Image (cartoon, rainbow, N blue to C red):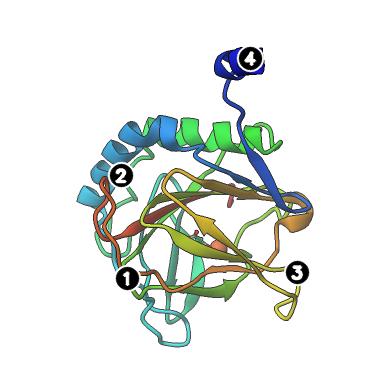
Amino acid sequence: MNDLFDSIAPPEQPRETIADGAYLLRGAALAFERDVLTGLDAVTARSPFRHMVTPGGFVMSVAMTNCGGAGWITDRSGHRYDAVDPESGQRWPPMPESFRGLAAAAAGAAGYLAFSPDARLINRYEPGARLSLHQDKNERDFERPIVSVSLGLPATFQFGGLRRKDPVRKYALRHGDVAVWGGPARLCYHGVAELKEGMHPALGGMRINLTFREAL
Ligand code: SIN
Ligand code: FE2
């Protein structure tokens, strides 16, 4: 009886709470995988990944690009959103339609309705790349969520509290997982530990992270 019920029950969307307002949606991007990878190729053909420089003069180990209206950039003068890719001198490439659907579905599954991101930062991690603990603070509204999609090699996500010295928990993020944090968790410190070597069937030796935000 139980076996039969199990076999016909719809698959549950697993939602793991990592803090009040912060969730991990395991595998939530898998249904969008093919279209998202096609969209990613279209974006990087026009605005390739590049290693940006922090205001302190350090070259970031994570390579970045953007698509859509507002692109996140950093250079010696600070970090900010800009409609123009400083390398091409043109506007960032348009956001692929598949990105929009994925971002809205994931935000909704985490309980954040009517999510309409204008900023989509794309991060590329190669083995050895890491993102140190930080808050996302360049956006206008610190209640609206961040939707963060993991593709390719697995990574260790570090998620802390509202103060830098708060304890940090670690979560494995795998291909297709989506992290969403907003409301009381919106300004939590987070980062990504150094990426380990590996080979992913769809993306090879790298991890890609898509970060959606309502920035402006
Ligand atoms: C970020 O904090 O912007 C990226 C997080 C990630 O790569 O998972
Ligand atoms: Fe971040």
Residue of label 2: 40
Query: Where does the image place residue 79, in percent across and percent down from the top left?
Result: 50, 71
Query: Where does the image place residue 33, in percent across and percent down from the top left?
Result: 36, 36
Q: CA distance from mark 3 to mark 2?
A: 32 Å
Q: Nearer the viewer, mark 3 or mark 1?
A: 1
Quarter holding the N terminus is top right
Q: CA distance from mark 4 to mark 3?
A: 43 Å
Q: Residue at x 68, y 32 (%)?
A: 113
Q: Residues within 10 Å of mark 3 (few under 14, many from 20)?
A: some
- Amino acid at dot 2: Leu
Compare residues 169 and 115 and report the one nearer the observer: 169
Using the image, tell me which numbered label, if any, was put on residue 162.
Answer: 3
Q: Residues within 10 Å of mark 2 (few under 14, many from 20)?
A: many
Q: Residue at x 27, y 37 (%)?
A: 38
Q: Quadrant of residue 137?
A: bottom right
> Could you tell me if the residues under marks 4 and 3 are in contact, i.e. CB atoms within 8 Å?
no
- The earlier-in-sequence mark between 3 and 1 is 1
- Amino acid at dot 3: Leu
Residue of label 4: 5
Please give left or right for residue 61 compared with residue 115 in the image: left
> Could you tell me if the residues under marks 1 and 2 are in contact, i.e. CB atoms within 8 Å?
no
Q: Secondary structure at mark 4?
A: helix
Using the image, tell me which numbered label, if any, was put on residue 100.
Answer: none
- Viewer can see residue 127: yes
Q: Residue at x 79, y 55 (%)?
A: 184
Q: Quadrant of residue 164?
A: bottom right
Q: Nearer the viewer, mark 1 or mark 4?
A: 4
Q: Residue furthest left?
A: 45
Q: CA distance from mark 4 to mark 2?
A: 39 Å
- Amino acid at dot 1: Pro
Q: CA distance from mark 3 to mark 1?
A: 29 Å
